[in-house]
Amino acid sequence: MGQVTSLLSAIGQGEREALGELYELLYPELHRLAHSRVRRSGDLTLLDTTSLVHESYLRFEKSGAVAIGDRSQFMAYAARVMRSVVVDVVRRRQTERRGGDVVHIEFDEAHEREAHERGADAARESEVLRVHESLEELAAIDARLVKVVEMRYFSGMTEAEIAEVLGLTVRTVARDWEKARLFLHACLR
């Protein structure tokens, strides 16, 4: 049994320290996934790559014992956790932007320009949430397509990597990706 598999087994049995060891061992791969996610969202999340990896670690730790069989499944699960982190950060920012009980004031031209830039960020944040909501709809139709999107769009995994994780052919993953893209495109219009 490989080191990753034995650590995953230990995590599944509730050994908390195994998660730290696993993250340390897979840190370069997790960092690459996070970098891909942060690159796609730009400055929307205010998270850098390292923060996203660390936040996902905290979520894993909070979830307790998770039954994951191998490295590929773990990376797919990590992709899902990173998606969740990004969506939560965007939701929190939108809530803060609405201001709640904050007193609103009129802006001069400099403030208007700044507000316009924030509006562009808000539009991109809104798109992240619309993609997330569309994926929720897609999950009701075909959960595998959602996994493909999470691994491809949110984590930057290649079709070959996704095929390995899901036990599919690369051609099937390519078809699933195309179906999911068409569905999302229709939802986002």
Image (cartoon, helix red, strand yellow):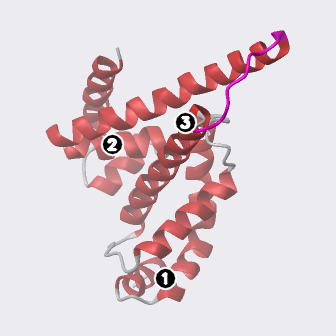
Q: Which residues are magenta?
A: 101-109
Return the residue nearer the eye: 44 or 48: 44
Circle 1: element type: helix
Circle 2: element type: helix
Judge from the rendering whether residue 68 lies leftward or rightward of residue 125; answer left or right: left
Q: Name the spot of residue 88 as percent of width and height, x first.
A: 49, 48
Q: In the rendered structure, are the residues bearing label 2 and label 3 in contact, judged by CB atoms less than 8 Å apart?
A: no
Kindly identify which residue carries mark 2: 148
Crowd around label 2: few <14 · some 14–19 · many ≥20 (10 Å): many
Q: CA distance from mark 1 to mark 2?
A: 26 Å
Q: Residue furthest left?
A: 141
Q: For the N terminus, which image quadrant?
A: bottom left
Q: As shown in the figure, which amino acid type bears the numbered disc 2? A: Val
Q: CA distance from mark 1 to mark 3?
A: 41 Å
Circle 3: element type: helix
Q: Is residue 74 above or below residue 17?
A: above
In the rendered structure, find residue 86 and report the number of the disc placed on it.
none
Kindly identify which residue carries mark 1: 3
The answer to whether residue 144 shows anywhere in this view is yes
> Sequence order check: which comes first, mark 1 or mark 3?
1
Residue at the spot x=31%, y=37% of the render? Answer: 135
Q: As shown in the figure, which amino acid type bears the numbered disc 3? A: Gln
Residue at the spot x=31%, y=41% of the render? Answer: 170
> Sequence order check: which comes first, mark 1 or mark 2?
1
Q: As shown in the figure, which amino acid type bears the numbered disc 1? A: Gln
Residue at the spot x=41%, y=50% of the render? Answer: 161
In the rendered structure, find residue 94 and report the number of the disc placed on it.
3
Q: Residue furthest top?
A: 109
Judge from the rendering whether residue 55 lies leftward or rightward of residue 168; answer left or right: right
Q: Name the spot of residue 99 as percent of width and height, x first.
A: 60, 35
